[in-house]
Image (cartoon, grey):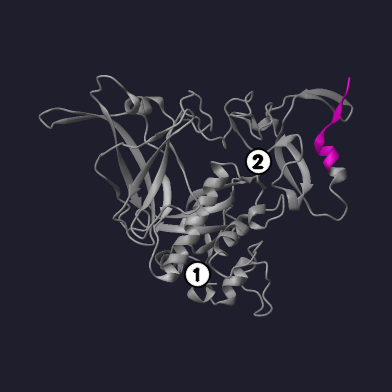
Amino acid sequence: MAFTYLAAALLLSSAGSGDETTTIQAWRQHSGWVLDGWTIRWVQGYDLDEDGYAAAGAPTSALVSLVVPAATKLAPPAGYVTKSGDLDDHDPDVHPRRPEILGNGIDDDCDGAVDETEFHRLASGDRTTTGFTMRVRINDREILDVYTATGFVIERLTYRIEYQNLNASSGAVLQTGRRDVSGMTVYPSQAELLATLDGLTPRNVYRARVVFFATRRFTTGFETHRQVGDPSEWYYQCTDATNEMAADRAWIVSRALYSEFAAEQLGLLGYHGTAYPDGTAFGADVGEPWCTEFYSGCADERFSMGHRHYIGDFDPPPVPLNSGAITHYFLGFGELTTVDAGNRASVLASLLPGDYVALDTTGDGNANHSAMVLAYEPTDDRVWTVEGNTGGSQCGIQQRDPAQIMAWGRLQASMRD
């Protein structure tokens, strides 16, 4: 019979003399016997399918404390996972980063919805100054059956778009009229509809979703509508602009939103990405916290940002500025503002899409996270952001409490490439 030592003890001796270490909490992937001191005991594993996610409901009492090098604290050692939420721990194709599959009756992405409507996003954004086109992926058989019905058909598939301008002060959710679905592409594994939203304001960030209906039209012209399926998830996009500076802001926001999609829907970024492990797509090292690289990697394609790998101090010596700190970059242009209760209201009123914010996500008064601004919504007093390295290893669109903002970096024309 083979035994293994408790991993924490092994890692204590292998972290390396002189290296900075830290302690993380993780679940074991596999069940087995361990030798804990002089005691042999059985431990339960919680990622049996090895997809990188512990089973939903994995108990916190089963977390193991692991001493690891601080530089790789976000990458758990082999045999351990730090994230949970897997609804089927016997199927590696079911986990929180899995795209939903058409009509299979399975919650593939473990978000609590089965066969929900999603979006496919292109790097170009499919956007103009006054609108954008969404590639709607229909996974619900109920919706598709209305569209593909043959014979004596008395209902047709229609949809409307509900949308919200996140930069508007009202925060109102508007909606289009109902539209007929025509020319939808149907494949065995997916169905895709192109849905265009226009008449929008340039360089503003919007979110939109699609609701489908089975519509019956009578000879009198009267129509009835019954909703089929659930509304889609929200789609986020920034309209283009004619002014060069505004267009560059819109471009880096669109790029960041595509990067978020590539990470969360295509699995191309993050600890279980198939192309770029961790944040290496933006220049980060494997295991390195990469929220700042996410911002600078997207912004550098239009602004002279370079590779910024940490937040930095807000008040360093005037020269030389550390080339790796993102706050030092904005300080060099005189565009970094430390935010406190005295100026927070004026900063919030000045935020524009693409700006940088340093956040305190732990409540200790120190900035520990970087984010790109989408919009400030005064109605609900929240800041919309798109971020890298959220939740330990993912990208995401977040709604932040303004009190979390410690510093604001404003983009300006002199920064443009």
Q: Is residue 254 magenta?
A: no
Q: Where is residue 345 in the image (x, y as percent from the top left)?
A: 41, 65
Question: x, y percentage for residue 120?
Answer: 47, 42
Callout 1 amino acid = Leu
Q: Which of 51 and 24 is in front in this view?
A: 51
Left or right of 219, for residue 249: right
Which of the two residues, 24 or 194, is positioned nearer the viewer here?
194
Quadrant in which the C terminus appears: bottom right
Residue occupying the point 53% across, 33% down: 109
Determine the secondary structure under disc 2. loop
Residue for point 58% across, 74% down: 331
The type of residue carrying mark 2 is: His
Q: Which of 181 and 286 is in front in this view?
A: 181
Q: Dot 2 surroundings within 10 Å: few (below 14), some, or many (20 or more)? A: some
Q: Quadrant of residue 175?
A: top left
Residue at (85% x, 39% y) in the render: 10
Percent x, y of residue 391: 59, 45
User: Does the rendering let one see residue 368?
Assistant: no
Question: According to the image, label 2 marks what residue?
Answer: 272
Q: Which residue has dot 1 on it? A: 411
- Of pointers 2 and 1, the one earlier in the residue sequence: 2
Where are the magenta residues, as a range? 1-11
* Alpha carbons under labels 2 and 1: distance apart: 32 Å
